[in-house]
Image (cartoon, rainbow, N blue to C red):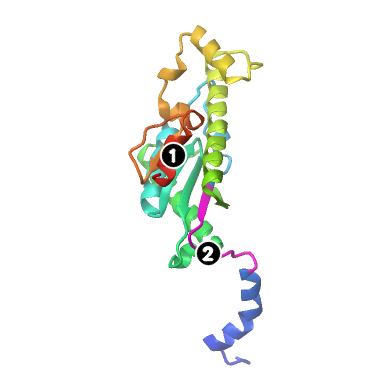
Amino acid sequence: MKKIYTYGAAQKLYSPFKKLESKFDIHLKAGNYYILRFDGKEMTAGFKIKHQAINDMFFKTMRESFYNFVDTFKKTLFAYSFSDEISILFKSKKTDDDFSRSEKLLSLLSSQLTLNFYKSAIKYNLDLKNKDWLFDARILEVTKEDTLSYFQARQAFAIDKYLTQLKGQYGIDYKLHKSDDIIEALKLKGVEYSKLNPEYAYGIMYSNKTSINPFEFAEDPTKLRLACFGT
């Protein structure tokens, strides 16, 4: 060997790149609220069953992945999931170590969620279609008011997506776009939206503050605030 190799020498050689690494590694602010959002890559289309609003095996897999994930990430205050998406609200603390660095937080938790997904998929015998399934991750710094608006927005996407899927299942005119019109059209087909599985209709929810069943966030923002912050 032409060079003498030591850990200290390697550190010195790599030091310029360590600075480049830190350029995108944002440190979370202690005491602030953050939301992590995970999205399955191409899962919605990949697990869709034609003329069926819900793929039951995929739903059960995601549901269990969701609950296992929030159980693993003990900092979760509130969490919401629909289809292949999961959003987690948490508050950063000064002593968080790895969980105070955005880069490490996102990479570790997206890996953990992917692992949970595969374990649940095996349990429920979900056909993985000989593909590799992944979750991407992003982080948002939010205020309390931002948080309520954020979850209302994500649920709005969820409700619209489910209604669109129901249109396909029950052969309802694809030109109908407003929720009231679609719900009325479903009623004419003998389907009462209010009596459908609430986890399909409103999403899956978790709160470490209170016991919670699925509900419409825009209808009861006070209940949403209580679920997120306890006050």
Q: Estimate the spatial distance between the alpha carbons at disc 1 and disc 2, rounded to whole Å.
A: 27 Å
Say the numbered circle drawn on residue 62.
1
The residue depicted at 38 percent of the width and 43 percent of the height is 207
- For the residue pair 101 and 224, the one nearer the viewer reads as 224
Mark 2: amino acid: Arg
Q: Which amino acid does label 1 sit on?
A: Met
Answer whether residue 133 is visible to the viewer in this image: no
Magenta residue span:
23-37
Q: Mark 2 points at which residue?
A: 101
Q: In which quarter of the image is the C terminus?
A: top left
Q: Earlier in the sequence, mark 1 or mark 2?
A: 1
Eyeballing the image, is 26 above or below 38? below
Q: Residue at x 48, y 32 (%)?
A: 217
* Overall secondary structure of the magenta section: loop
Q: Position of residue 54 (x, y in %)?
A: 47, 27
Across and down, in percent, residue 41 comes to 57, 43
Q: Is residue 24 magenta?
A: yes
In what element is the residue under mark 2?
A: loop
Residue 154 higher or lower than 52, as above or below: below
Q: Where 26 falls versus 208 (above or below)? A: below
